Amino acid sequence: MIDRRTFLEFLGKGTVGALFVPSFLAGCTPGKWETIVPIAPASADRILMATGLSYELLIKWGDPISETDQFGFNNDLTACLPFDPAQPTDGILWVNHEYIHSGFVSGYWGKGEKTREQVEQEMYAVGGTIVRIRQQRNGKWEIVENDPLNRRITGKTDIPFQWPTPIYGRTSAMGTLANCSGGVTPWGTILTCEENYDSFYGERNRETGERNPGADKWYTHFDNPPEHYGWVVEVDPKTGAAKKHVALGRCAHESATVSTLPDGRVVVYSGDDANNQCLYKFIASEPHSLEKGTLYVANLEEGKWVPVDFASQPVLQARFLDQTEVLIRLREAAPLLGGTPLDRPEDVEIDPHTGAVLVSLTNNYGKNNYYGSILKIEEEGGDHAALRFQHSTLLAGGPETGFACPDNMAFDAAGNLWFTSDISGTMMHKEPYEDFKNNALFVVPRAGAQAGQVLRIAVAPVDAEFSGPWFAPDGRTLFLSVQHPGENSGRPTTLTSHWPDGGEAIPRPAVITIRGAALDALQRATE
Ligand code: FEO
Ligand code: CA
Ligand code: CA
């Protein structure tokens, strides 16, 4: 169990000195929210917020974004970019759409085989949404309907591979799917990660060539190769142009978190979210580009990044045909190189004050790790291109800290750590998770009287998880996904949630915006 003092030392508070106060708050006088009163675990079918915070619904599944397109299902990453950096109230919002609940999306409740039309409905529900958003004078963010930027990327959008040779015979893939978390590049594009891709087209066994069936079985109508999914996809939100970056490898990418080096090259961190899978980083070899570079896998025992490189690794040459096959079979290559198996590495975020790299390790039932933790990686010399690092546990979940199963994280401009929990729908409210109740949003203040405390400040509706937290350019709004409310609804007559519409309505995943004096005060707190 880590105590508060140790946590602050881990954050590097002692070396940073006075904390940064965002410019928009520099002239503010302290408000009444000197302390945040955390809220108790709850199991209601509604969103609960700590005093001093409030939320508004921005967009939900099925809402029109243009005359031809609608918002997709099970939204995750939200990334709000300024349309014009001089106008923080005018933004472009990218939202990931991860997976589907067939009953809600296509009316398939598990009997017989899906029709082609049902599969196409499901293909439309995943991928991503781009919408122009504006903040009104009263502070409320709204979708700009029919803005020329508004568009969908779906499971049927043709997306080329960024790679010199075809991937399983084709130079492009049909669609993107399983879009979980991701990141943004310094040149203003979105990185969207294809996480549990095997649910849709299964996975091919390398030795036998047989396909392991996925839950959704889209291949019964669209025989696309499984190898076309599991990539980091870059999208230009102003044009919708997309490409799949083969150089970053193929696995259940949860996220793609970008750091920019002084020479303009970028480093991308990404976890493979499954039990006993690895953490990776890609170091680009050219500025402002992800097309070329070296992929590394983390060996925590020796504190080193190992290149996933066919040309220099005899152990890879002995098993694979070439670098293309190594990248397609990244999960099989990593253990050969000494990659450390981790307990479901999900989101990665970089501490804006210290440069430390935080990794959510959600859980690992096979190792009796039910509560998860947040791992801290400190690169040698604070250099994200370094090939040596040290690691430690920043925060451990459990009854003492009051959270379980950390997933997505975000730092605000003042360096407070925000994170969400993802206790799975099948395990929520069951041993050993009963006391945690519904999933929640937490904040760990960096300064002030509550520095280092883990504060539960919002609770999600039934079966849902909060995901994809992202701060608006001015830091005063937190965009947040409410994903899979009512996921355990087995039939249309036994709905477990009616959020957000209430009554007898079916549940709908949605994006909310959180604002309030408490959020502002958190970013104002100093030592
Ligand atoms: Fe899509 Fe690992 O959460
Ligand atoms: Ca996640
Ligand atoms: Ca998760």
Image (cartoon, rainbow, N blue to C red):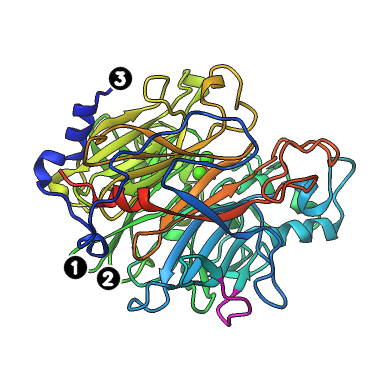
Q: Earlier in the sequence, mark 3 or mark 2?
A: 3
Q: Is residue 37 visible?
A: yes
Q: Position of residue 263 (x, y in %)?
A: 19, 68
Q: Which residue is mark 3?
A: 1
Marks 1 & 2, CB-CB < 8 Å contact: yes
Q: Amino acid at mark 3?
A: Met
Q: Residue furthest bottom?
A: 148
Relative to 514, is 394 on the left or the right? left
Q: Position of residue 301 (x, y in %)?
A: 27, 29
Q: Which residue is mark 1?
A: 263
Residue at x 46%, y 19% (from the top left corner): 367
Q: Earlier in the sequence, mark 1 or mark 2?
A: 1
- In-front residue for pair 230/88: 88
Residue at x 34%, y 76% (from the top left corner): 85
Q: Could you tell me which secondary element the residue under label 2 belongs to?
A: loop
Q: Quadrant of the C terminus?
A: top left
Q: Nearer the viewer, mark 3 or mark 2?
A: 3
Residue at x 71%, y 61% (from the top left corner): 62
Give the answer, above or below, for where 259 lies relative to 491.
Answer: below
Q: Amino acid at mark 1?
A: Asp
Marks 3 & 2, CB-CB < 8 Å contact: no
Residue 205 sits in quarter? top right
Q: Position of residue 225 (x, y in %)?
A: 66, 55
Q: Which residue is mark 2?
A: 287
Q: Position of residue 430 (x, y in %)?
A: 61, 20
Residue 268 sits in quarter? bottom left
Give the answer, above or below, for where 220 lies relative to 390.
Answer: below
- In-front residue for pair 159/151: 151
Bounds of the magenta segment: 143-150
Give the answer, above or below, for where 527 lies relative to 134.
Answer: above
